[in-house]
Structures are given as structure tokens and as C-alpha cells.
Amino acid sequence: MNWKQLFSRALAADPERLHFAAHSHHLWPDAAYEGHIAAAQDALELADRKWDKIMGPLWREAQGHIASMLNLPDPQTIAFAPNTHDFLIRVISAIPTRPVRVLTTNGEFHSFRRQMDRWSEDGTVIVESVPPDMLVEKAQSGNHDLIFASHVMFNSGTILDDIEQLATLARPEGPWVVIDGYHGFMALDTDLSAVAESIFYVAGGYKYAMSGEGICFLHAPPDYAPRPAITGWFAAFDDLSLPPGKTGYAPDGRRFLGSTFDPSGLYRFNTVQKMLANTQLSTSLISGHVTTLQQQFLRRDPLPDMRLLNPLDGKPHARFLAFQGSIASPLHDALGAQNIITDVRGDVLRIGFAAYHDASDVERLVEAITGN
């Protein structure tokens, strides 16, 4: 089983390419292309008036899709931005104490880690980094203003199972809990209904939402961070009744907005969601397909000298397999020379599976690795 027909444009653009980096840059389905064209068409036809559509029905539709997938009680807690880093700096800006005491894991993405390193240099933050399995214990100390952790660790595929425990520690006055869901959103069935009132959740469309760049979102719990210090004029909605000299904010997730942005990601996201609904292609269905392909790959045992960091154990699993070993980088390069796209981070080779793969693709990958 596969859904290659939904990705006909991307596959036809390079027929010899074997793309096993869906966890990094997911190939666009045809629907994403169609959404991109729709964004351009509206810009041509509506000009200035396109923003009435973008900030109206298009915005609400995207909020509705996300709220449905995450089981959030109120779609209006969701805001959009070009990247999750924009949300990180706005959340930090809303914390009144300095330096901000941050607890995080040692498996976070480069962008977050780099920003923490730089803020540590100038005294904006004090960071404590621990292995994921120690996070809850450290968080219970009560010595932190912000707890930041990924739902799925980008390098190893380790899944954080402690979100509800972390949520019990969150308070509007601090600490705040931020979950980076980028490698979990639309890769794992995720129900945030029990924690929606107390955690922030960020993710985006570049990976498993199949929508390309520029479409990231934040769920901001009510009563938390009402006035981010880093702000743009799009966050000023609903403040017209305020007295002069008072900086107002929207009462919902829009308080985290910045300024003018490229809206094409919203179009792509919504058209991809319609495609999934029309084909009855759910997160769980794709995940089941991916698991079958991962099992096929592992049965062939093409990497006996590498350590699998995230073995299949019958539980929810990342959409990629992470293999650690000294040959990670040269193997990545050797596969790339054959137009087989994987991903390497230091000594970890990541192989990502998707709806556009089938059993024959896995066999081609195995043969390229083993030489037979």
C-alpha cells in the first residue's frame, strides 16, 4: 500500500530520487502545490482585500483543523507564525523575571539550543539541561520559570511520555511548560484536551503536516503570558477601546502574533487537510503504514554495525529510525551520491518513512546500503 498518486508532482520532478528524509523535509503532495497556486491567485485577484480572507475564513479553517487533531477545546487559542522560533522569543519576553530560569532536555533542536546558548552568554537565561528521563524529577524542584521539552526528540526519536505530569506543575505565575511538538504533530495521535489549559504547544507544517515552510503555530493556554514584550501590530486586534498610551493585546492566541507574513503556508495547510479528509488518510493510518515499512527495513538488518536509538517496541514511534555509529556521515554521503536522501546529525543517521514510500522503495534502500 502507498499513496504515491497524491505526490505525483514531487515524484515526477525527480523520478530517480529516493527520498527517505520525510522527517526533515517532507515531500509536498499535489494538494500543497494547489494551495500555493491558490494563494498567488488570491493575491492577484483580491490584492489588499486578500487579508480579509486570510485573517477570516482561512485563519479559522486552519485553527479548526489543528484543534481537531490535537483535541483542543478552543481553536482561538491558536496563533500562526513563520517559524516556532518566533514563538519562543515571544514566550520568553513575557516572563517578568530576569534571568529566566530554564529547564530543558539535552535533546532539543539546534535553533532552541543556540538561542539558549546566546542568552546564557548575556545573562538573559540560566539553563539547566538534563536527559529526558530526568526532566520531571528536576521540574518538581520548583526552581524554574520555563520548562521546555520536545514531544519527540529530533535526534534520537525518543518520545516524552511525561506531558501530563509536567502540566500539573504549570501555573500562570510560573513555571510555564512549552512542548515542542514538531516531530510529533501529525506523526503521533496527540490528545491535549487534559492539558490544554496549562501548557504551550508549538509545531508546524514543514514535516508531517506536508505543507512546506512558513506555517507554524502556537497553542497558548488562557491566562498565561497575556502581554508578550516582543510583539507586532497583528497582536493589536481588539484593543481599540484602550486609553491612549496603553499597549493592547488580543484576548486569545493572537496576542502572540507578529507582523505582516507570507500567508501561502495557510493555503497549503488547508488544502492538504482537505486532501487527507477526502482520501480518509489519517495520522494513525499513515503511522501504521510507516511502521510496516520500518519493520521491513529492520528485518533485512542492513546496518548491523550501527546502534538503533529508537527500536520498535509496539508503542507509538517516531516516523524515522535513528542509527548511531561512526559510519553515519560517510554512509549518508554515499547514499546521497546515488540520489538517495537521508539525514545525518553528527554520528546519527536518520531514515524517515512516509506515505509516498512502498515496499519496493525499502528494498531499493536496503540494496543501496548493502550493495546487494
Image (cartoon, rainbow, N blue to C red):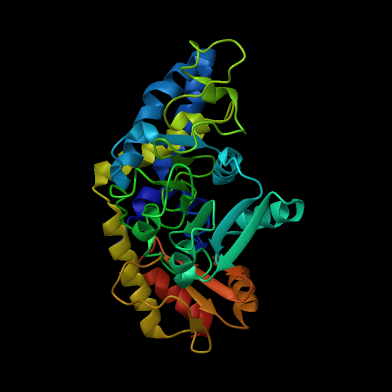
For the question of whether residue 339 can be seen, the reply is no
Q: Position of residue 240 (x, y in %)?
A: 50, 11
Q: In the displayed image of the protein, which residue is found farthest to the right?
A: 122
Q: Position of residue 98 (x, y in %)?
A: 65, 46
Q: Quadrant of the N terminus?
A: bottom left
Q: In the displayed image of the protein, which residue is found farthest to the bottom?
A: 305
Q: Nearer the viewer, residue 197 or 334?
A: 197
For the question of whether residue 314 can be seen, the reply is yes
Q: Is residue 319 above or below residue 299?
A: above
Q: How many marks?
A: 0
Quarter of the image where one finds residue 60: top left
Q: Nearer the viewer, residue 238 or 154?
A: 238
Left or right: 108 with respect to 267?
Answer: right
Q: Position of residue 349 (x, y in %)?
A: 55, 73
Q: Nearer the viewer, residue 256 or 216?
A: 256
Q: Is residue 343 above or below residue 4?
A: below
Q: Nearer the viewer, residue 103 or 180?
A: 103
At horizontal 59% and vertical 10% (from top left) the residue drawn is: 244
At horizontal 52% and vertical 62% (from top left) the residue drawn is: 17
Q: Position of residue 108 (x, y in %)?
A: 56, 61
Left or right: 115 with respect to 343?
Answer: right
